[in-house]
Amino acid sequence: RARSPAPLPPAVGHAVLAINGLEVNGRFTADGRDVLEYLSSAANFPVAIRFGRPRLSSYEKLMLASMFHSLFAIGSQLSPEPGSSGIEMLETDTFKLHCYQTLTGIKFVVLADPRQAGIDSLLRKIYEIYSDFALKNPFYSLEMPIRCELFDQHLKLALEVAEKAGPFGPGL
Amino acid sequence: MHTKTMGSTSTMDARFTRGKSAILERSLTRPKTDVSLSAFSLLFSEIVQYCQNRVYSVSELQNKLSELGQQVGARILDVLVMREKNGKRETKVINILLFIKVTVWKALFGKEADKLEQANDDDKTYYIIEKEPLINTYISVPKENSTLNCASFTAGIVEAMLTCSGFPAKVTAHWHKGTTLMIKFDESVIARDKALDGR
């Protein structure tokens, strides 16, 4: 879960994310109207359009997560010393991927701004929220997507706290 | 024949319990012991899942949870009456309700229940209201059966306590101002209470 970016001009690979604040999924707006049709009618102008990289579908997320899982396994096998922790952080010039593997082998992955501090504590906080609001919830089935209201609430709160800490750590 | 003198009740008790089980040797006054909330939550979560696998509808699930709660309530009533009230049972509706709101809640959840109210238009209906019941701390109910409230278990505890103290009642859990336990007393209970007042 990344922070919502500032408005960007359209670029290669970008798609329409929202029109006048209304979310767009593929070719249709959230209330089911055709995007191209909506934009071709002058009566709807002026419009504010937000562009950005299209969001990953859950299928794509699963695929990427499985790929990362393999990379993680390769990472620990390549280690000359036994008992490697695997990949804890992957750095690029636009983002950092932080991974935390629990004792039971569940991986939590956070994609964040490379300057964002305090991700380690965020990952542990997410683990805590997962063990509280997913595992202690009788209506959650293991290994399935987490659809628990309290989990979402607390995760959102933790992300807000981490975001307030800002790119240079808390206190600034 | 073996005779007993006054003041030796403890030896008399021990005569029946000695060697049967360690738990029977323990004194009734209990040191302050708290159970970990995590351990309780995980156990309760498993209880709910166990019940869920054996029912076909939300109301059946609530009934099942309530039945399990009744097992707890019937047992805890005796021990709390002995510990906190010197074995004296309440005879008035309002007193037994306050006993549940204060003493029972403190023993079970470590704090009093938030509110105890009587229905405006009905003298046999009472409500115990809790904004955030401990039992629901980690539970998010799925949207498709949003009427389900796992506090049915607590409702079962309260129902058994009232019924076993001679105040037959039906107790159900609802989502209202947080969680509300609705207590509906039997007609005879209210009639008896009024008769007692009249004396």
Image (cartoon, rainbow, N blue to C red):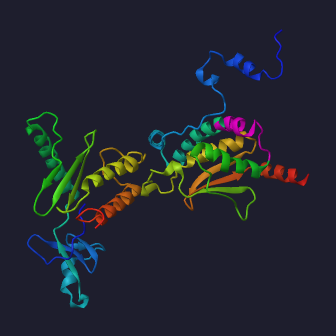
Can see residue B54?
no
Rendering coords of residue A88 (x, y %):
18, 48
Rendering coords of residue B63 (x, y %):
57, 45
Q: Which residue is more in the foreground, B5 or A172?
A: A172
Above or below, A43 against B161 in this view is below
Q: Which residue is more in the foreground, A137 or B142?
A: A137
Does residue B89 appear to the left or right of A43 in the view shown? right
Q: How many marks?
A: 0
Which residue is rendered at x = 17% and y = 35% of the image?
A83
Q: Quadrant of residue A4?
A: bottom left
Q: Quadrant of residue A93?
A: bottom left
Above or below, A114 against A104 in this view is below
Which residue is rendered at x = 32% and y = 49% of the image?
A127
Q: Which span of residues is magenta-colored?
A: B76-91
Rendering coords of residue A108 (x, y %):
25, 50
On whether residue B140 falls in the magenta region, the answer is: no
- Residue that extends furthest to the right in the rendered view of this protein: B199
Rendering coords of residue A160 (x, y %):
33, 64
- Assign the N terminus of chain B to one quadrant of the image: top right
- Residue that extends furthest to the bottom in the rendered view of this protein: A43
On whether residue B81 falls in the magenta region, the answer is: yes
